[in-house]
Amino acid sequence: MNTPDPTQLHIVTYNIHKGFSQFHRHLMVHELRDHLRTLGPDIVFLQEVQGHHSRNAKRFEGWPPLPQYEFLAENVWPSAAYGSNVIYGHGHHGNAILARFPIEHSHNQDVTQLRFERRGLLHCTINLPGLTKRLHCVCVHLSVFARSRRHQMDALAGYLEEIADPDSPLIIAGDFNDWRNEANELLAHRLEMIEAFGGAYGGLDSPGRSFPSKRPLLRLDRIYVRGFSVNKATMHSGAPWSKISDHAALSAHLTWADAEVPLLVP
């Protein structure tokens, strides 16, 4: 495996629907693993990751013996962090971050607003060799209710303002459920971040449409960055991605702002 260049980051965010196709008809975690590896990102932000499910393990042939985040990371992403948000008698699921670089610290912040809708924000600090500051990464899956989302974004911004220097490199990615595009005003401007599709293409159609994955109409999933320029942003919708999850996967190629290297051409 080639040593990744810390000044050139390729990241992906994906709501994996607990490893099932739309309407939970087919187990797709093996196809998911193959296609994530084909993309070859350095850091992966995953939502609706099944940490454990004893019933499905008995019901579905091919159910991985490992938690899904470990199964997906195996032999490719040496570092992985997981935060369980929804816990039930037969299992739990939440967010995960997989990385080629060392994850030095992880913290799952409970931002639940409604007791029937458990939510958490998974924060990791990642050591990028040669960079003087640690990279802060946050994987989010926000509420489907606007008022709760606003509280959650305020909690996230407050948390990051408290624990990270204002010039620290930062990536926030995941399922924002934010079809009103309030995150730009409530989160990105406050933390001086740019949205990946706007950063790559001048904001003409920012952010990208990601749901449903077969024919995306709603702009639910996002990648926000600080300290990086966005060279290329891609929405992975339609086949084969639409067979894996009801959300599209998003990817972005980033360049560390202090690095003098040529940009990719979209």
Image: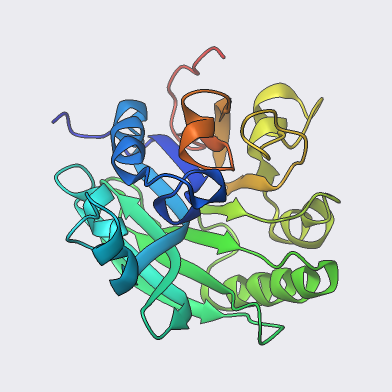
Residue 129, given in percent of the width and then of the height, sits at: 26, 47
Residue 72 in view in this figure: yes
- Against 42, residue 99 (above or below) is below
Residue furthest to the front in view is 59
Residue 139, given in percent of the width and then of the height, sits at: 51, 59
Is 27 in front, or is 247? 27
Residue 227 in view in this figure: no
- Residue drawn at (70%, 47%), measured in percent from left and top? 220
Relative placement, left or right, of 233 versus 108 is right
Q: State how the image is colored.
A: rainbow
Q: How many marks?
A: 0
- Against 67, residue 257 (above or below) is above
- Residue drawn at (45%, 51%), measured in percent from left and top? 45
Q: Quadrant of the N terminus?
A: top left
Residue 83, given in percent of the width and then of the height, sits at: 41, 72
Relative placement, left or right, of 193 versus 75 is right
**Residue 238 sits in quarter:** top right
- Against 107, residue 141 (above or below) is above
Q: Quadrant of the C terminus?
A: top right
**Residue 195 sits in quarter:** top right
**Residue 114 sits in quarter:** bottom right
Is 78 in front, or is 101? 78
Relative placement, left or right, of 114 versus 110 is right
- Residue drawn at (79%, 28%), measured in percent from left and top? 205
Is 264 in front, or is 165? 264
